Amino acid sequence: MDVERMDGRTVAVFGGSSGVGLAVAKGMARLGARTIVISRSVTNGQRAVDTIHTHGRGSGLVESIVGDPSTRTGAELLATALTERTDRLDALVSTAGSIGETGRTAAGVPRVFATNYLVHFQLLRSVLPMLDRTPGSRALMVGVAPALVKRIRNVRLDGVDPNASAAALMTQAVAWKLLLARHLADIRPEGPTVNVFHPGLIRSNLLATQSLPLRLVGSISNMFAKERCTVVEHLASSRSLAGISGRMVDDHGREVALPAIVTAENATAVWTTSERMAR
Ligand SMILES: NC(=O)c1ccc[n+]([C@@H]2O[C@H](COP(=O)([O-])OP(=O)(O)OC[C@H]3O[C@@H](n4cnc5c(N)ncnc54)[C@H](OP(=O)(O)O)[C@@H]3O)[C@@H](O)[C@H]2O)c1
């Protein structure tokens, strides 16, 4: 995969305090980008910055911003905080995610869906003006393994079933990310490119607070996991990818065939529903 230096470019990593996001933030800093870790917690954000410094940050400035885009107001505050720090945003890499969350948000959305889709939508929508102002900018959202994408069939486009299983909600979240990327690619061909990536197996805390068997799975997975997310280094930096949008790529940078539900019409429907759900 083609990777270029990113000196002079600025990247914000939402979810950059852990797992995929931390691996991405390390990579961006190593390539020389000014790297802004977004976390809901001052402590987590600062810990990530310290970790990146310890592991050789390259020449890029590394800093953190605290914010929570789970509400429209929170997303707008975060966008304002970013604007106050930087006048350019070359890439937004959105990696926040969870599994096993239960309950609903104040707006009645199942938390697992809110964390794995809605926060990404809210943040991306809020920072679009910044991305628009930066020529060649990119938005990248974390996805799942291509084998799981292949299995996506019909998902609801008009809302979320609060009684759906966690697995169904996770599947819907991925499908909606693909549809969000497709919609922005369709309606804003001159705007930032928007793509979804599979990071590969990356060292993670995703299962750290789950049941003992799942924690064991997490520990074993971490023994084989990588600490670098090379596909994002490629997608964020390579000038050869300018203009490529609305796609999904795997951890080797190969394009993944999108499920049949990813059509322009469905993408518009999901944008409209997301707007309605985002409060
Ligand atoms: N790790 C892998 O190998 C892998 C592979 C494929 C796909 N993925 C996907 O990547 C996503 C992240 O996984 P990970 O391994 O990076 O997990 P992780 O190590 O647990 O990190 C999760 C990150 O998301 C943030 N976060 C969690 N809940 C949030 C919420 N409600 N709102 C905003 N931010 C929230 C956390 O930030 P703060 O708590 O600091 O705010 C943290 O930085 C998941 O959707 C996962 O399915 C991971």
Image (cartoon, rainbow, N blue to C red):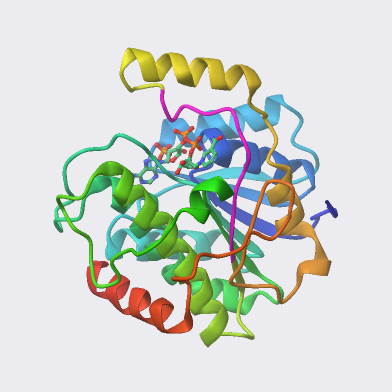
Pick the residue in front: 32 or 273: 273
Residue 196 shown in magenta: yes
Residue at figure coordinates x 27%, y 67% from the top left: 278
Residue at figure coordinates x 36%, y 61% from the top left: 75
Give how far across and how far down residue 155 sits, in percent. Answer: 33, 63
Residue at figure coordinates x 74%, y 43% from the top left: 230
Pick the residue in front: 104 or 252: 252
Residue 45 shown in magenta: no
Give how far across and how far down residue 165 sits, in percent. Answer: 23, 44
Residue at figure coordinates x 40%, y 61% from the top left: 153
Q: In the image, is 118 to the left or to the right of 204?
A: left
What is the span of residues highlighted in magenta in the rendered image?
Answer: 195-207
Give how far across and how far down residue 48 sits, in percent. Answer: 56, 32
Question: Which corner quadrant holds the C terminus?
Answer: bottom left
Q: Is residue 196 above or below residue 42?
A: below
Q: In this view, does 179 lie above or below 50?
A: below
Magenta stretch secondary structure, dominant: loop
Q: In the image, is 22 to the left or to the right of 177?
A: right
Give how far across and how far down residue 192 sits, in percent. Answer: 61, 75
Pick the residue in front: 109 or 84: 109
Assign ligand 1 to one image quadrant.
Answer: top left
